[in-house]
Image: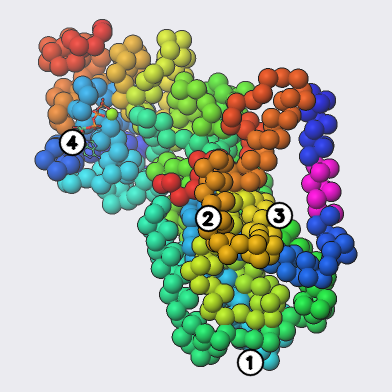
Amino acid sequence: MTMDRMLTLGTRGALAVVLVVVALVPVLCTTFFTSQVGLTSLWLGIVAVSLTFLSGYGGMVSLAQTALFGVAGLIAARLSVESGWDPWAAALAGILAATAVGLLFGAVASGSQGIYFLIITLAFAQVTYFYFAAVPTFGAHEGINGVRPPAVLGDPVQDPARMYWFLLVVSVLAFLGLRHVSRTAFGLALQGVRDDPVRMAALGYNVRLHRILGFTLAAPVAGAAGVLSAWSNTRMSAGSISLAIAILVLTTAVIGGLNRLEGAWVGALIYTLCDTYLRGWTDRFTTWLGVVFLVIVLVSPGGVVGLLGSAGSWLRHRLAGGAPPPAAPSTPAPPVPVSSGGAR
Amino acid sequence: MTGAATGPVLRVRGLTRRFGGVVAVGDVALDIAPGERRAVLGPNGAGKSTLFNLVAGADTPTAGSIELFGADVTRLGARQRTRMGLSRTFQTSRLLTGLTVEDNLYLAAIGVSGGRLRLLRTGRDRTAREQARRTAESVGMTDRLATLAGDLSHGEQRQLEIGLALVAEPRMLLLDEPAAGLSRSERQLLTALLLSLDRDVTLLLIEHDMDVALTVAERVTMMHDGVVIVEGTPTEIRADQRVHDLYLGKAHV
Ligand SMILES: Nc1ncnc2c1ncn2[C@@H]1O[C@H](COP(=O)(O)OP(=O)(O)OP(=O)(O)O)[C@@H](O)[C@H]1O
Ligand SMILES: [Mg+2]
C-alpha cells in the first residue's frame, strides 16, 4: 500500500500548501481582498463551525448560533466603545456572556429534537434579534459604531494583515479544539447521543446533560466569531444577527458540509467569494445562492468537502489501478457519518 | 452488596403496562434469584419486550413495583438502573452507528465506570479501552474494532449488541432475543458464550429459539397476552400442555 501511503502524504502535503497559501493572503493579495474576502470568510467560518459541530457531532441543527454570536459581539462592542473597557477584557466578557446564554438556550432546547429543536432555536434567534434591535444600550437599530480592535491587531480596514492572521490562528484553534473534543469521552458520547439517545440512556448516560453541555461548548466559539466580526467591521448592530444572517450561517455550513469541521470555512469562503464578486453581475444574487444551496444539498449531503472527499477516493482508486469505488466515499473513518443532521 | 445476596436480584409485583386499550403486561409477579438463568417465552405480542423495557427503565409502568438488588427502582430512569449493574440488549439492534465498534464498547464501559464528561484523556481511558478490546475478543469481534457499527453485517450487529451489554460487567443481564437472525453456527457460539457467563451474573433471556433458551435456562417463565401462565423447569415446560398449545406447537421442538 505504498501508493496509498504516498497519496495520504500527498493529501497532507496539499493541506500544508493550502494553509501556507491561506496564510500568505495578506502578502499576495490586495488589501481589499484580505479585508473583504479574507476577514469575512474567517469569522463567518468560525460561527459556522459552531453549527457544524453541533449538527455533525450532536445531531442538533441550531439556528441560534448567530444569537450567541450577537450576544458576544454586541456586549464586547458596547463595553469597549461606551464603557472604555480594554478590547481584550471586553471580548472576554462578551464570550463569557455568550457561553452563559448558550447554557440557558441549551437547557431549554435540549428537551427537543429534530424539527422542534430547529424551531426553538429559531425562536431564540428572533428573541435575541428583537432584544438588541430595541434596547438603546446596544444602539438599537443603529448598533454600535467605531469599535476599536486591540492596537496590536492594527487597523482592519487600512492594514488588515495582522487582524487576518489573528483570525486565522483563532480559526485553526477552533478547528483543533473541536476536533479534540470530538475524540474525548465527552465528544464520543455526544456522537452516541446523536446516533441513538435510547441506547445511550441504556448505557448509563444522561442524554439531556450531554446535549446541554454540547450546546454550551459551542457557544464560546460562536461568541468568539461575534467579537471578531465586530472587530473586523469596526461595528455591529442587531442587523448583524437578523434571521437572514442566521439562515446564511446555516447555508454556509451546509454548502461546506456538515460532516466535516473544515467544511465551515470552505462554505464561508465560497459564500464570501460569491457575495463579493457575483453580486455586481446579477441582481438575482440571493436566488442564485439558493440554487447553489439546493444543488449541493441534492448532489452531496456532505457538502463541498464531501464532494472533494468522494473525488479524492475515486482518484485514489484510479491511481491504485482498482475499479472505481462505490458512490459513497470509503475514506477511512470520517469523524461524522453522512446520516447525521437533525434527522431525528 | 446489601441484603441482595440472599433476597432476589429482581422482584416484580403487580407490574402492569397498558397501551390505550391493550394490556401489554398485566399484573405480572416475578422473582429472580442471584445467579439464576431464567428464560421468558411466549408468542409474538405476549408482552416480553414490554416487560424488559419496564425492568430496564426504558418504559414506565401503569402500575406495580420493581425492586432491583434489593432497592425499589420503580421511579428510577434507565441510566440509574444501568449504573446499579443492570444491562440489556434490544430486540432490534440499537447501536451507535456512526462510531466504531471499539468506541461503542468504550462508551458502554465508561457509561457505568464513570468519566462520561471527560474532555481530557486519562488513565481511566486506557482501562476502559482495554475493557472494550477484551469484550470484543469474547464476542469474536477483534478484527472489526475499527469498523463503523453501521457498516456491520446483521450477525455482527447482534454480537456487538451483546458486547455492549457485557462490557461493563453487569450483575444482571437482560437479553431480548439475542439469537434472532443468527446463523446456526452463530447460535452455537452464542449458546457457548451464555453458558460461559460468570455465575455472579444473573441472566434473564427472551428467546424464541428453544435450543438456545432451554439449554441455557434453569427456569422458564411462559407469558401470553401480558400475563404469566406457567413457570417451571425446562423439562416441566416441555411437558406442559398449555405451552404446547400456545407456543411449542407452532415453533419447532
Ligand atoms: N409502544 C407501544 N405502543 C403501543 N402498543 C405497544 C407498544 N409496545 C408494545 N405494544 C403492544 O404490546 C403488546 C406486547 O408487545 P411486546 O413487544 O412486549 O411483545 P413481545 O412478547 O416482545 O413480542 P415479540 O415476540 O413479537 O417480540 C403487543 O400487542 C404490542 O402491539
Ligand atoms: Mg419482543
Q: Which mark is residue A290?
A: 2
Indicate which label's residue lies in the foreground, 3 or 1: 1
Q: Confirm if mark 1 falls within 8 A of ligand 1.
A: no
The residue pinned by badge 4 equals: B25
Q: Nearer the viewer, mark 4 or mark 3?
A: 3
Residue A280: image quadrant is bottom right
Where residue A75 sits: x, y (%)? 59, 81
Q: Which residues are magenta?
A: A12-20
For the residue pair B10 and B145, the one nearer the viewer reads as: B145
Above or below A231: residue B190: above
Colouring mode (rainbow / by chain / secondary structure / one colour): rainbow
Pinpoint residue B105: horizontal percent, then vertical percent: 54, 35
Q: Are marks 1 and 4 in contact (CB under 8 Å)?
A: no
For the residues labelled 3 and 2, the Cα–Cα distance comes to 31 Å
Disc 1 marks which residue? Answer: A82
Crowd tier of the residue under label 4, counting other residues whose Cα lies within 10 Å: few below 14, some 14–19, many 20 or above:
many
Give the letter of the chain under mark 1: A
**Quadrant location, ligand no. 2:** top left
Cα–Cα gap, marks 1 and 2: 39 Å
Percent from the top left, x then y, of residue B68? 32, 42
